Amino acid sequence: MTQRPDGREEGGFSRRTLLKGAGATAAAGALGGAVEALAQDAGPGLPANASGIAGPGPVPMTLRVNGGERKLDVEPRRTLLDALRGDLDLTGAKRVCDRGTCGACTIWLDGEPVYACMVLAIEAVGSEITTIEGLGTPDAPHPVQTAFRKYDALQCGFCTPGFVMSCAWATKTHGAELDDAGVRASTCGNLCRCGTYPHVIAATLEAAASEEGK
Amino acid sequence: MPRKVTYTVGQAGGPTREISVNVHDLDVDPWGVDAKLRVVGTEVPRLDAAVKASGRAKYTYDMNRPGMAYSRLLRCFHAHAVVTSVDTSAAAKMPGVLGVTTLLDVGGRITFAGKGVVAVCAETEEQLDDALHAIEVAYDVRPGAVTTDDGRAEGAERVDERRDNAVVGRRGRQERGDPDAALAAAAAQVSATFRTQVQTHSALETHGCVVEPTGDGEYTVWASTQGTGSFRGTMARALGIGADKVRVITEHMGGGFGAKLGGVDEWDRAAAFFARDLGRPVKAMLDRRAEHLVAGNRPDSIQEMTLAANAEGEITALVGTTHGTAGNGGGGAGAANTRIYRIPNLRMTQTTVSTFAGRARAFRAPGHPQGIFALDGSVDALAEKMQIDPLAFRLKNDPHPLRQVQWRVGAERIEWERLRREYPGDGTVKRGVGCAAAIWFQRGRGNYVVNLQVARDGSVIVSNAVQDIGTGTRTVLAMLVAEELGLTPERITVRIGDTNFPAGPGSGGSTTAPSIGPAAREAGYHARLALAALLAESWECEPDKIDWSGTTFSGPGGKNSTFDEACKLIGPEGLAVSGQRRPNYKQGFSGETAGCQFAEVEVDTETGVIRVLRIVAVHDAGRIVDPLTARSQVVGGVIQGVSYALHEDRRMDRNLGDMVNPTLDTYRILGIADCPKIDCLLTSIDSGFNNAGMMGLGEPVTVPTAGAVANAVSHALGVRMTELPITPARVLAALGGAR
Ligand code: FES
Ligand code: FES
């Protein structure tokens, strides 16, 4: 399991656990039930074998994203981040470090923040995925997004979707109890190079204090 | 016909100066220090905040084009090697592979880890990975120094076979007065060697582009660049076509800090060739390791400094020798800025040492953070030796009228006198306070044109090719136009980051806002004149009988009109005007922007761990158009400076010549948990160099931070810290050495 610096765990399986496996079989073993749903076709030229191994070619799968179902064909080794960005054109989550350090790819999996670069798309089958696009829109923003604008908690904005997802989780979880240390703990897995941290803290505290932010 | 305008510039309620400028007949009058402004100077949320915070902003990295293929380079991670064989045959036959091109043939020489050897293009990123793994390249690996000390050592292998590694650059020698006599006559002098590390820009969006052939031999290119114009020019040259055939788009950009100036790179060219040959869009973004290795850095430095003063506490001489490596490139030696303090006698020599490592690139105030670390460290050491308060010593030696104000403002905010008295305190956890100076020069440049369109419904579009790299350029342009038209900035649609619009400045040297802002103001003013002309026609009076209150037009007989009412007079085709920036005014308030920062730190003398508690940053940048986004710039510069002072360090393996920490978990940048409290005090002035009185802000704000932090740590410990980053190990070593 991958632990975030604040002690929370990411998803049920980590990408690293899978990569440690000796190949598709080990991966399929680790995936257990999730694979059954995917076993119809393991990819061009590689029909699924009796044990239901998916891949190594693209496999069809259905992801539940922002309340809707999205069908896609991707290789089992494709990360959820790359599938969201490349296959579903949900490019709010960013690829920055691609190894679970920077938090720019933060999304919610079943309501909990995870690094989408550390989850395989195939692992997310059956989970409820919320991306920044599902949180709010420019016209109907989430309170955290409104506060980010007000406090200028963004410069280049490349880290911003990840921060917003972490901060919105913090306001949802802690409501008005959230304090300075709580915001820092909830976002210490997010990096910003432009230097927006103080404004992120101010914005998130205001959103948490607001009625809707709870 | 030029007109002469005489007006007052400088700081409201502070130092001012009267100047006269000649402006063109139809040009807007400069504002001056007393201008009563409605929009400029108020806090306006950045216009693209909502689209960025909702994840809708499309960066280059986010472009998914129909039929898009992916390209990447196979890189050599030896510092110095010669290619002895390349076999791409297996890769070329792999599924999904669309193209393989060898960039270096057998015999090709590699002089830094990360050099591209083979370019590959494939349908998917996974297929691209597989193909890159299937390429076999063999090298004859040679010795090659990767550090400044090794590069300048006797008998070191040469990076460029035709010349020595150590070279004094064109502007590498500075001399004035008689430094030797001044040193001999000095009442006190201090000598120390300061060392700084290599820092990488580490922008979150890596370098790269998407190149799309659009038919007829033309291309649209989305690029993560700080200069849409230079990217277009260099891309066109790479493709061997005219610049008119290339359109570059940079609507949003994920950070650059200097590393994304100067046009296309090796990987961009490879993507363009694949796109041309395949007739399909091709995307090429660097991965994080390549970004660290090949996309630029701030050079390291070894600065041997001697600073001397007379018995009155006046600095009399500075003698300095600095070395630094810019890898394969030039401009390696950061050096103390010699224009901050009055230094009558001076000798400085700067030597760039070539090494077998990736080239440096401009990085937020090139040369300055490292130079100020050494200069203000020496100033503190000399003050201490002479038993003068370091701030009093600076006030005595700093001739800049505005910085004189700023030192006092900052000292009051941080409670300098009390903290100097009470710190470092007893116990094992010590505290300290220190300060350092900032300077910058940019008044903006160029004769850029901003286009402005107004429709009958009152909608306004402002356009220019300039890119917003996160500094808030888009918002500043809207504010300047809104000021002239009596509107709110949200009413203005700003279309930028596209070379289909009039050329704009590259974002380097903190020049963007003062280079393009005055043109936007001018465009807004011209739109107002055009509306006044329409009103004059309708009101049957001369245009010069129409007045403007800042929000409404008025004419003879008590007639008046808002902007929106006046727009109804516009024909169905709309109204278009432009505004052009004029050359900088000659006089101005001061050619240098000033600033200073104070740091308060806590150091655990048992573990060596440093916590920066607080930074007080006092800066001027001419007229502050949007204090909200300006403060973000300051806070950002401070955070990068603290990060540089305490954490960042590109570590090279001296034997293998590769970077040991080319990831974001091993190359540490400051995180939110360690972020200090930052007080930002902006002293807005009218600079008197352009119609809006603007100057640049991005760079000076990171100049003094590391120096101030180092001085604060030295105060806490009673030992001078002379090497960055100030890690716990260095703290403990310094304490051990002092015992
Ligand atoms: S891209 Fe996923 S944590 Fe950095
Ligand atoms: S705003 Fe640029 S990285 Fe955070």
Image: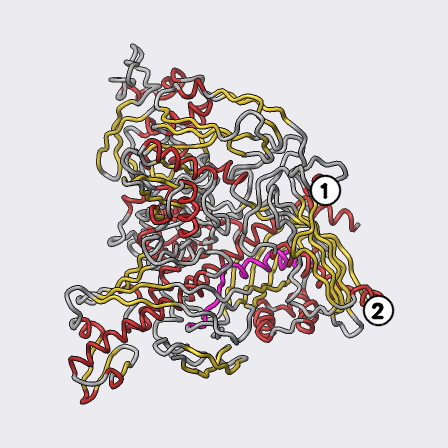
Residue B220 visible? The answer is yes
Q: Nearer the viewer, residue B101 or B40?
A: B101
- Label 1 crowd bin: few (<14), some (14–19), many (20+), radius 10 Å: many
Vertical order, B559 against B270 (above or below): below
Co-location on one chain, circles 1 and 2: yes
Query: Residue placed at 49% from the left, 20% from the top?
Result: B87
> In which chain is the residue bearing label 1?
B
| Residues shaded magenta | B692-715
Q: Quadrant of residue B220?
A: top left
Q: Quadrant of residue B655?
A: top right
**Is residue B705 on the magenta stretch?**
yes
Q: Nearer the viewer, residue A122 or B636?
A: B636
The reply to whether dot 1 and dot 2 touch (C-beta < 8 Å) is no
Q: CA distance from mark 1 to mark 2?
A: 33 Å
- Label 2 crowd bin: few (<14), some (14–19), many (20+), radius 10 Å: some
Q: Identify residue type, mark 2.
A: Ala
Q: Identify residue type, mark 1.
A: Arg
Q: Nearer the viewer, residue A210 or B548?
A: B548
Q: Residue under circle 1? A: B152
Residue B175 placement (x, y as % from top left): 73, 63
Residue B210 placement (x, y as % from top left): 36, 40
SS category of the residue bearing label 2: helix
Q: Residue under circle 2? A: B185
Colour basis: secondary structure
Total marks shown come to 2
Q: Quadrant of residue B521?
A: bottom left
Image check: B463 left or right of B233?
left
> In which chain is the residue bearing label 2?
B
Residue A173 visible? The answer is no
Of the residues tagged 1 and 2, which is closer to the observer? 1
Query: Residue placed at 31% from the left, 23% from the top?
Result: A58
